[in-house]
Image (cartoon, coloured by chain):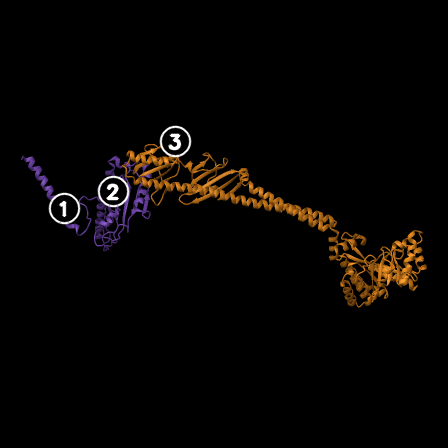
Chain colours: A orange, B purple
Amino acid sequence: MHRREKIIIGTFLAGLLGMSVLFASLAWVLWRESIAAENAYAGNLATTLGERTERIIADVRDMLATFDKLPAQRCSPEHLDALQNAAVSKPYIRGIGFWRAAQRLCGVGFLPPAGIKPLRADRIYPNGVIAWWPSKQTEVGGVKLFLMRYGDHDVAIDPSLLLDLGPSRHRQAVLWVDKLRMAAMPPDAELPPPGAVPIGVTLKRSQGVIVSHYARDEILPIDIVASEPIENFWSRHASLLTLGSVLGLLLVLGWTDIVFRFSRYQLRPATELRQALAAHRICVQYQPVIDLRTGACVGAEALARWRRQDGGSTSPAAFIPVAEEAGLIQEITLTVMRTAIRDLARIRREARTVSINVNLSRDDLRNSRLGDALAEGLKAEQLEPRLIKLEITERALVNTDTARQLIHKFRDRGHQVAIDDFGTGYSSLSYLQSFELDVLKIDKSFVDAIGTGAATSQVILHVIEMAKSLGLQIVAEGVETQEQARWLVENGVFHAQGYLFSRPLDLSDFIEFLRSRHAHDDR
Amino acid sequence: MTTDNFSFGFAILTRLVALMLASCALVACAGHAPTRPAAVVPSVRGHGSGNTERSEAEVKRDLAKNERNTLSVSEAGYYLDVLQARLVQALGADVKLSRTPDRIGIDLAHRVPFESRGPWISEASCRLLQPLASALVEYRKTAVVVKVGANGTGKDAERLEERRAHAVAECLSRFGIALRRIVIMTTPSAEATPATDVADAGLVLDVELILRDGKRGR
């Protein structure tokens, strides 16, 4: 699988994974928040109901205590008026009775004259208050009443008025006191008992409801079990969900953008080139330079080659401009130079006089980095500087002090400097004169024109004349035919390179080429 | 004056003399102890003997003869509940109560101290029983069993228990509880050991329901 495909698939998978993780995380956070909110809601409901119930009980107890202190004669009109006023002031009271021991003597409200006498009290508090939870025994007119007695008076309370669920019509709730079902809303609500539901919020997907259970044990042991359809739950938390969705969308968009940018970055040639440099996939091939008079190989031009992972290669014409644009060209020059220096040790075992030409770019002439590295490399391999020649294209030959000084320094150290691809720029004789140069390499386009009768076929003669007038050695590039070679010799050009002699070769093949050439010479 | 008139006048006179003598006796004792056994004594029975059980039952049967003093079994639970709450209200939340289906035991040890060297309780101690007695007056369908413990065995200890129980019964009766509702139970005499005449001897009142036909509550 090619790198590009890998990146595209990887990007797709990363995007998918990222979106999944984001949505899952968001859903989890929203769910947790919703559950926490629901817990608080159920807790608040239970607390409210519990506090309300406890407040009612405390109120009723205080009221009963005041009855025992009434100055009016018991069961007199004044006494009954006082009871009546109290009953009217508290809507949940269904009746108040006055008792002598276990005999109801009088009372107000909607209770039977003999009162209600359950078999057993459910709770007797330390202050002397007795409570009977709603049950069959306390049922009057279909309403199971909650009874309280303190001293000689008792009160009957309608427990359904203790349970106020607010505006939610779909919510069901049951109030349990001391594990006894005390009130329900609606009255026929079917909910599991507190023992069957864990404390907190439980989602029952199969039934499509969310059940909340909250327990409280202050004055009364209270359990609230409530349920409502999941849709209500979601709608109650709609604002949170909307906010979460927007946030999630933004996060996903952000993630997608990051992945897309990363992918684009990965797919950029410059990035690929940078990775190739790091992975040592920039290799060097050598194109022999031949002495046309003897046929001997006198040197070679080191050419950068980009070997791709899939086995293919990219042409220098394609990646050198990319490298120049991305600021990587100096790295490539250094790589080629170091490789050439390293390979020279082997090459010299075959031919001691063979030199290697290394191409420099415009960036290489802007600082001394390359020169320093070159000097160090040669020193380390104990090679003479003359074995490395430096080629500078006509277009890279910028007329700056720095470039001039660097060229001067190269030549001082013993390197020869060649102007490469000459003729493709607009250099004049006077311009060339301003640089210290040793060799001029004629561009292939002029060599191709030899013998064709084209207009450019005459230009090469002027180039040769100019080089000669400047005292420069001449090397012709791109020689492909014997005719071209013959013409060049006839016109005083004695060094050439091109497919006529050899394509660029790997080191081992170049060494083999040298051997064959020397053997040829020997013969 | 006819013979009948004379007999009637004599009878009146003898009763007056008897009353005066009784009053003198009471006044003479008043400086020594504030509360003494009453002239009309409640039923006194020993703890644990078969005779005691029968006698306690007899007392309850006597009380049950008046149906207004009795409860049906179905009312027993409610009656005991409201009585228990009333006792808590009267004696405070820290009172020690024990309950069976037809009885509430009230542990008054350390609440009502006796005189340290005698069988009596002080006026102050007696007043402590007033709220309790007021509640029990209201809940008249019960018998009140007074149990006094003494730190010792033998005749002396038994006698001390009995006299102290009488003092409690007398005190309760002063606040309105009919003596016929009160049963005194004492520990039967065993091997004689010196009675340690201490003030904080145990006092327990059992308030027992009077059920119709002698049936027990639930």
Circle 1 packing at 10 Å, graded few (<14), some (14-19), many (20+), is few
User: From this viewpoint, which residue is outermost toward the left?
Assistant: B1
Name the residue at 69% across, 50% down.
A262
Which corner quadrant holds the C terminus of chain A? bottom right
Q: Which residue is denoted by mark 3 in the rendering?
A: A141
Give the distance between the C-alpha atoms of the residues marked 2 and 1, in whole angstroms. Answer: 32 Å
User: From this viewpoint, which residue is outermost toward the front?
Assistant: A430
Q: Which residue is denoted by mark 2 in the rendering?
A: B56
Q: Quick one: B9 or A15, which is closer to the camera?
A: A15
Give the distance between the C-alpha atoms of the residues marked 3 and 1, in whole angstroms. Answer: 61 Å
Task: Give a yes or no on whether discs 3 and 1 share a subunit.
Answer: no
User: From this viewpoint, which residue is outermost toward the top?
Assistant: A141
Give the distance between the C-alpha atoms of the residues marked 3 and 2, in whole angstroms. Answer: 44 Å
Circle 3 packing at 10 Å, graded few (<14), some (14-19), many (20+), is few
Circle 2 packing at 10 Å, graded few (<14), some (14-19), many (20+), is many
Q: Is residue B34 above or below residue A59?
A: below
Q: Report the amino acid beneath label 2.
A: Glu
For mark 2, give the secondary structure.
helix
Q: Which residue is denoted by mark 1 in the rendering?
A: B23
Foreground mark, 3 or 2, reads: 3
Chain containing mark 3: A
Task: Give a yes or no on whether discs 3 and 2 share a subunit.
Answer: no
User: Residue A111 at x, y = what percent?
Assistant: 35, 33
Q: Report the amino acid beneath label 1.
A: Ser
Q: Is residue A296 above or below residue A237?
A: below
Foreground mark, 2 or 1, reads: 1
User: Residue A304 at x, y = what percent?
Assistant: 80, 57
User: Residue B114 at x, y = what percent?
Assistant: 24, 51
User: Residue A176 at x, y = what percent?
Assistant: 43, 40
Among the 4 quarters of the image, the one containing residue A57:
top left
Q: Quick one: B162 or A120, which is closer to the camera?
A: A120
Residue B129, can we see it? yes
